[in-house]
Amino acid sequence: MSPIKSLVVGVVLLLAATGVQAGELTQLEKNKAIVVDFYNKALNDKDIDAAIALMGPTYTQHNARIPDGKEGFRQFFTGFKQKFPNSHSTIVRVFAEGDYVILHVHMVREPATRGEAVMDIFRLENGKLVEHWDVLQAIPETIPHSNTMF
């Protein structure tokens, strides 16, 4: 059996064994792409309107510092853009299950600083972002092991 044929058979067997349907896998990949696009538009391009265009009719915010809804998002990120015009976020990992997408991110608000480790959770409905949670942790100068936060 050729290596490519073996790979295809292996993927089919893996999908069958895990119970993942091809359509579900495709939707998970679409959800991941939508969230990554949203995140880059909001945090790296600082294009607030383009990010809001990827939201559903409502946007429920669970971050304690950001007002709820699309206008709350607009208000917060307008201020963020002004305060941190050189900020950059690097998406390190993307996970998806069902309607949820989780990002593991290295956010640096000011160049030449250590930044923060961020976990963002998004819920989507019909391909649109409708809910958000996050946890941020400052990257300390020293840590008690040789692992990174990423």
Image (cartoon, rainbow, N blue to C red):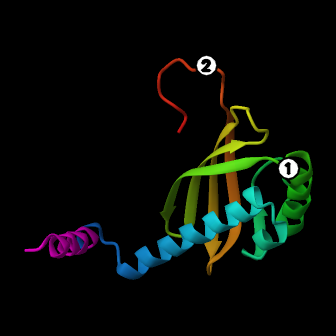
Residue 10 falls in image quadrant: bottom left
Is the C-beta separation of discs 1 and 2 under 8 Å? no
Disc 2 crowd, CA 10 A, few/some/many (<14, 14-19, 20+): few
Structural distance between the alpha carbons of marks 1 and 2: 27 Å
- Looking at the rendered structure, which numbered label has been put on residue 85? 1
Question: Outermost residue, left direction?
Answer: 1
**Residue 122 percent coordinates (x, y):** 64, 62
Boundaries of the magenta span: 1-15
Q: Amino acid at mark 1?
A: Pro
- Left or right of 72, for residue 38: left
**Residue 59 percent coordinates (x, y):** 77, 68
Q: Please determine whether, in this image, residue 138 is positioned above or below residue 107.
A: above
The answer to if 14 sits in the magenta stretch is yes
Q: Residue at x 69, y 41 (%)?
A: 136
The answer to if 55 sits in the magenta stretch is no
Res. 61 in view: no
Q: Please determine whether, in this image, residue 47 is positioned above or below residue 126.
A: above
**Residue 1 percent coordinates (x, y):** 7, 74
**Residue 65 percent coordinates (x, y):** 84, 47
Magenta stretch, overall SS:
helix
Q: Choose between 14 and 64: the one closer to the eye.
A: 14
Q: Amino acid at mark 2?
A: Thr
Q: Please determine whether, in this image, residue 127 is positioned above or below residue 42.
A: below
Residue 42 falls in image quadrant: bottom right
Q: Choose between 71 and 142: the one closer to the eye.
A: 142
Q: Please determine whether, in this image, residue 26 is positioned above or below residue 74.
A: below
- Looking at the rendered structure, which numbered label has been put on residue 142? 2
Mark 1 or mark 2: which is in front? 1
